[in-house]
Each structure stands twice: as structure tokens, then as C-alpha cells.
Amino acid sequence: MHDEDDQPKPLSSEPVHLAQRLRGYIDGLVDNAERDTEDPPWLIDQARKNYTHLPEHEAIETHRKTMKLRPHMQRWMIKQAMTHVLRLEYHLRCFILFLTARIIEMGRVGEPPEPRAPATPRGLTYAQRQDQEMRENRRELPRLNGFKVLTPVIESTGKRKRPRRPRPYHMLPDDLKVVDAGHVFARLKRLEHVLANADKFAMSLAISAVVALKPPLPVQGEGVGGEGEILPPSYTPSSQTLLPQGSEGLKQKHPLYFAPLANFCPPAEHYDSAPDYDQKRDFNLIHWLASSGLEQIGLGVRPDPYQGLPDLSCLDPPKPPQIRSL
């Protein structure tokens, strides 16, 4: 028999406690990444040549500050760090969706902001573009795009063009080579920013969801089912076609739609990357909280029943001829 002390204690689902644990995971990952940083060999050689009057460690540090060198790591360490970054980004998405569901459930949604005026495009001269490129190269960390709370669905829009000439053969990269890891630290810094502003992201999502799902007002003078009312499209499949009629309407999802929440378990690649059992438990908990919270407010994510089925419209009977008056 197991003792009561050996049983894992239940994790708190309070937003403050969730944020505190998530903050600890991010801080631990930042500490590990800073510990794994390493100076590239070419930097060490240049420091030895330029600062012969200083000890080696002082020469390397001085040369690094002079060049404003971004952090460098071995390639295999970058791959390992990115798996943890992706897991924490997923953790943050679920946490923000959980807060959004709480805000909508409690009726704390604020007023939508006024639409911004369209930005006027400005043209940059050649000298300004060169100066902007120099500014980007001197940044301590590379510039990243805005954090997307919901993972975008990337679909192919056309046929892939075939290359005119055969691709050259490339050898596998050396995993022990020290390369630029600025993008890893930039994403870690972005995680800290998103966690500190998670409530603002959640409120923005809640306002977008309430505004987008607000039912349209019927035209004055029209009753239920009249011409002025917008009725939902019909999704009943025909006798031959497995996909529903008007299947393009299925692509229109609500603003809080997050495809991985359709499954009961979180993605295996993120779950397996958790370093210990406690983080795996917390990862399962936040996935369940986000999924159940959206279900409770009526915006649950359900798996697509027509996913993976063929489109058998080629077997449908021909459409009736259209008779028009001359």
C-alpha cells in the first residue's frame, strides 16, 4: 500500500497559482539557456590577437562587449531549448484561453475599443533602408513577429512549383558547432512579456469573441425566417457526397478556436518534452482547464467529423438545366 505522503498533491487551478508556476518554468529555462551559452572559436581567436595584454577570459569578455555579440550555443542545445520553448508557448496559449473563458463566464468583458485609423504608408530612401538594416544587425536580440495567441492554420493554396534544376546535396549540419542562438533568447524574452500581459491578451480575446458572436439584428418589419434574417447554412450531406453541402462554411471558426483542444490529451511532442513529472501534470491540467472552460461558455472545440473523408462530389447526379427567358 502507498502512504498518503507519496500521493501527488492536487495542483491549484487558481489563475494566480497557474501564473506563478508558469513563471517558474520560464525562469528555469532562461537560467539553463544562459548556462549553456558558449563563445564561438573565431571570437576567442580574435580576442587573443586584439587583446594580448589582458588575460584570456578578460580579453574574450571585452571583445564580446565591443562586438555586441548575440548569445551563441551548440546546435544540439538550441534544438533542445526550442522544444521547451514550444511547450511553454503552448502552455501560455492555454492559460490565456482559460482566462478568456473566465472573463466571459463572469461577464467582465469590457467595451470594444474604437477602430484605429489606417496607417499611412511611408517610403524609405535607400540610405534609410541601409541605416535600418544596420540597426537590426546591432540589436542584442533579433526582432520577432507579434505573439499569436492562437496557432494559425497553414493550408496550401496552390501547387508547389518544381525547381528548374536539381537541388544540390547538403551534408547534415554539425550538432557540436557553436552558432547564433539569438532567436532562442528572443523567444524566451517574448514569453516573459506575454506572461506579464496575459490578462490584457485575454481581455482582448474576450472582446473579439463577444463582438464576433453577437447575433445580427433582424431587418425592421421582417419576422422570423423573413428575407432580412440571416439563417445558418445547411450542412446536411447529399446521398453521394460525404462532405456537407456548403463545406466552405466549416472553415469559419469562432475567435477562440484552438485546434489542439479538440483532443482530450495535449500534443505528445510537448508533453514528452517536459523535464519532470510535476510539469507534465501541470501541462495536462492547463490543457484540460482551457478545453473545459471553452466548453462551459459554449465555445468548445470539437473535432471535425468530416476530416480525412473524401469529397465524392464527382458521383453526384448532374444539376438540372437552367431555363431562362430570352
Image: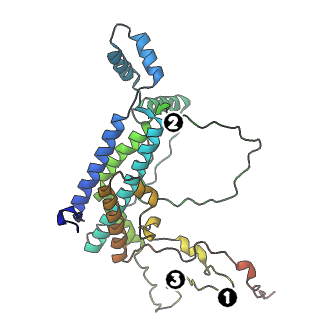
Tell me, yes or no, if residue 142 can be seen here: no
Residue type, numbered disc 1: Ser
Q: Nearer the viewer, residue 10 or 205?
A: 10
Tag of residue 175: 2
Q: Nearer the viewer, mark 1 or mark 3?
A: 1
Q: Nearer the viewer, mark 3 or mark 2?
A: 2
Residue type, numbered disc 2: Asp
Q: Is residue 193 above or below residue 42?
A: below
Q: Is residue 224 above or below residue 119?
A: below
Looking at the picture, how far across and down is residue 26, in whole percent?
31, 48
Tag of residue 232: 3
The N terminus, quarter of image: bottom left
Tell me, yes or no, if residue 26 can be seen here: yes
Label 1 belongs to which residue?
Answer: 239
Q: Residue at x 70, y 78 (%)?
A: 312
Which mark sits nearer the N-terminus, 3 or 2? 2
Q: Residues within 10 Å of mark 2 (few under 14, many from 20)?
A: few
